[in-house]
Each structure stands twice: as C-alpha cells, then as structure tokens.
Image (tube, grey):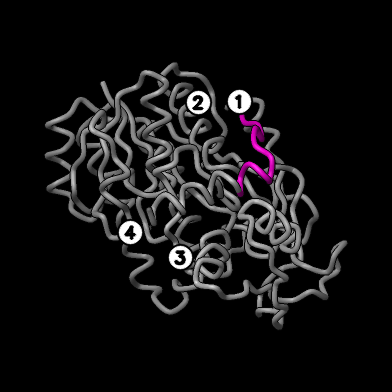
Amino acid sequence: MAWLVTGGAGYIGAHVVRAFTEAGIASVVLDDLSSGIREFVRDDAAFVRASILDGVRMTQLFEDHEISGVVHLAGFKYAGVSVQRPLHTYQQNVTGTATLLGVMAEAGVDKIVFSSSAAVFGTPDTDLVTEETPTLPESPYGESKLIGEWLLRDQGRATGLQHTSLRYFNVVGSGYPDLYDASPHNLFPLVFEALLDGRTPKIYGDDYPTPDGTCVRDYIHVQDLAKAHVEAAKRLDEGLPVERVYNLGSGDGVSVREIMTAMAAGTGIDFEPEVAPRRPGDPARIVATGELAARDLGWAMRHTLSEMVSSAWEARRGASA
C-alpha cells in the first residue's frame, strides 16, 4: 500500500514524499511539472506525470498502484497572481480537487490530507489566529483553498471520507541540500535572488504598529511541516480522530526586519535593506497557534530562524553549483 502525493515534485511536496519514505511508508508522486521539478523526486518513489484535471489518467494511476490515501498538494499557489488569473486558479484548485475526490471515490480510497493555507483567513483582526478565527479570504487563491476544505467536508458527509486540512503559514528552509524553494513570489527566494544578483532586498513599509515597524509573519520550517503530514496520514490509517482543520503556526511571529538581519548573517552577505512604501493589503501581523496540531500531529518548531535561513541558503546555492 502507498500514499499518493499530488504535487510531490514541488518544494513542499518533495519534502513530504521524503518524510514518508523515512517513516517507512511507500509513496507515489503525481505532478504535471508546471512548477514542480522532476529531479526533486528520488527513485524510491514512483512518479507519474499528469494533471489533477485529467480524471482518466488519475483513474489509471489508482488502478496501477495500491493507494491507501492521498496527500493533496497540487494546485496553483500564487495568491497575488490569482487576482489576475482567477479562472485558472479556480480550475486548478477547485475543479482539480473535485476531480481528484471523484476518482478517489470510484477507487474506494477514503483518506485524504489536504494542503490548505493561511490565506483562508484574509486579514484577521486578532493577534493570534486559531482554527476558530473567521475565514475571510481576500484573493481567489485563498477562496479556492477554503472551497477545497468545504469539498472535503461535504464529501465526508456524503461518503464517509476521512479527511483533514493543514493550514500553512510561511513555509521556509530546507531539509535536504537538493531541495529548494523556486517560487518567484516567496520572501526567502526573492531575497536570495536579489543578493545573488547584487541587488539590495526591499522591505515594504517600516511604519506598522509592530515593535520595529515592519510586518510580523509566522515562519515555519518545511521539514517540520512535512512531518506533520506523515503524522496526519498515520492517524487516518489507524482510524484515530482528527480535527477538520489544523493551523501549522509557531505561536510567535518574526518581523521582516528580523528576517533581513538573519539573512545577512546566514548568507554572509552584509546589506542594509531598502525601505519601500507599504504594499496595499499587507496586514501588520499574522501569527497562528499550532496547539491542536501539537496535540494530535506531533507538531513542533524544531528549527531556529537561523537554521531556517542557513538551510534554505545552502540548498539555493547548491542549485547554482
């Protein structure tokens, strides 16, 4: 028996696949490589290149492999771009998820761990986000992730599907020197590319009501995130109860200026970030508690900010070697 990991050739997905392997659980990767990287998938995991929109191909995959459950990470993940490409976002994240759930039902596979997002909260009016914080997404991406949670909920009611959704906050770092974040929109790779190009990284706004005036965010290490997926899958396999959603947060935020200071130390490149005007819609602070995930999924912050930076930098430099 194996777990299917959709989007398993991506930065987060590849970490999840390797965490499954290290836990002694076989996995099969489904990825269309629109943003994933084939080299991220080792030979110890079966690989199928296909889209989650391709129900015929996915049906064949379930026939070819003995799948016991699914970790669903595949989708369009760029919140800002989703505003310009709403139909594409909904097609990938809503239609794709519905197609996958339909194929799972036909194959008799009744367990799924869903990759959700902090984007479902929008701009929360609270210092510490919990699973009970109202969901008010502000982008098609955030809306599509919330709809994905609803699809699982409703399919669970209709068919008995066992499910849980993990809401990620800012995922950074690397657990392996050959796995790096290649996103053109995330803070860490944006800073690294600027430094490698000899440009000065930017801070957008330093007049927020925070201790140092810059936005405070919740950063979690990708390896810790991957382990939480494995624990969620194990609980579903063992028939243990799970919450419908879990926040994977640190409970304590880090400011953008603190990130920049850690970047300078971790890369060995001394710089003073350029301060640019605020970007519309950036909340001053988004930090979440991970108490429920700690109780059920062994969730813990096992890496310091320094380790997050150094591991990500090592992987990014390795990609250029």
The amino acid type of the residue labelled 1 equals Gly
Residue placed under numbered mark 1 in the picture: 298
- x and y percentages locating residue 106 in the rendered image: 20, 36
Q: Residues within 10 Å of mark 3 (few under 14, many from 20)?
A: some
Image position of 145 with respect to 184: above or below: above
* Residue 10 screen position, x and y as percent: 37, 49
Per the model, the C-alpha gap separating discs 3 and 1 is 28 Å
Nearest to viewer (mark 3 / mark 4): 4
**Disc 3 and disc 4: Cα gap in Å?**
11 Å
Q: Choose the circle earlier in sequence order: 2 or 3.
A: 3
Q: Secondary structure at mark 4?
A: loop
Instruction: Give the residue type that dot 3 points to.
Output: Tyr
Tag 4 or tag 3, which sits nearer the N-term? 4
Q: Nearer the viewer, mark 2 or mark 4?
A: 4
How many discs appear?
4
Pointer 2: what residue? 231
**Residue bounds of the magenta highlight:** 298-309
Residue at the spot 70% in from the left edge and 77% down from the top edge: 274
In which quadrant of the rendered image does the N terminus lie? top left
> Mark 4, residues whose alpha carbon is within 10 Å: few (<14), some, or many (≥20)?
some
Residue located at (63% from left, 64% from top): 122
Check contact, mark 2 vs mark 4: CB within 8 A: no
In magenta stretch: residue 11: no
Question: Residue 36 placed where, x, y %?
Answer: 32, 53
